[in-house]
């Protein structure tokens, strides 16, 4: 399946095959949480790594803005901002 995905230049399929290819999985003991994890020990091919890096860079700013928006909304919806301002005024 990997060869077919490469031949057809199907990057989404290549990501999927890389993720589910159990031939490269290793067991890792997580003693803190009393469990055993299965992790892939193979690296992404260079072209998929490059795509992944570009994706992270492209969406990093958007993720920051979204986080800030959600934080601001929570402040206003829970009236935390007003409480913090009132507390600040009382202290001075």
Image (spheres, rainbow, N blue to C red):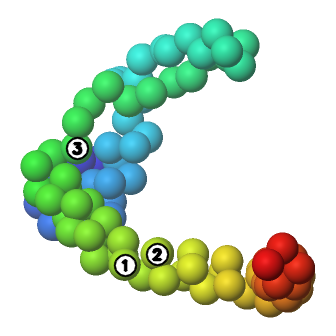
Which element type, helix, strand or loop, lies under badge 2? helix
Vertical placement of residue 71 versus 15, above or below: below
Vertical placement of residue 27 versus 72, above or below: above
Q: Is residue 2 left or right of residue 35?
A: left
Which element type, helix, strand or loop, lies under badge 3? loop
Q: What residue lies at 56% left-to-right and 11% top-to-bottom?
A: 29
**Image quadrant where residue 48 sits:** bottom left
Point out the tag, 3 or 1, that comes first from the N-terminus.
3
According to the image, label 1 marks what residue? 61
Query: Mark 1 touching mark 2, by CB under 8 A?
Result: yes
Instruction: Give coordinates of residue 58: x percent, y percent.
Output: 28, 77
Q: Nearer the viewer, residue 22 or 37?
A: 37
According to the image, label 2 marks what residue? 64
Q: What residue lies at 48% left-to-right and 83% top-to-bottom?
A: 65
Point out the tag, 3 or 2, that comes first from the N-terminus.
3
Quote the CA–CA distance across marks 3 and 2.
26 Å
Instruction: Give coordinates of residue 62: x percent, y percent.
Output: 42, 81
Q: Classify 10 Å Cα crowding around label 1: few (below 14), some (14-19), many (20 and above).
A: few
Query: Mark 3 touching mark 1, by CB under 8 A?
Result: no
Q: Is residue 68 left or right of residue 59?
A: right
Q: What residue lies at 84% left-to-right and 74% top-to-bottom?
A: 91
According to the image, label 3 marks what residue? 44
Q: Is residue 11 left or right of residue 67?
A: left
């Amino acid at each position: 399946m990997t060869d077919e995905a490469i031949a057809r230049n199907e990057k989404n399929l290549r990501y999927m095959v890389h993720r589910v290819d159990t031939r490269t999985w290793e067991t890792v003991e997580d003693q803190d949480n009393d469990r055993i994890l299965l992790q892939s020990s193979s690296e992404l091919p260079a072209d998929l790594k490059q795509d992944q890096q570009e994706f992270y860079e492209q969406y990093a700013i958007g993720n920051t803005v979204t986080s800030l928006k959600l934080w601001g909304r929570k402040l206003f919806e829970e009236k935390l901002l007003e409480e913090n301002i009132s507390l600040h005024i009382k202290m001075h």
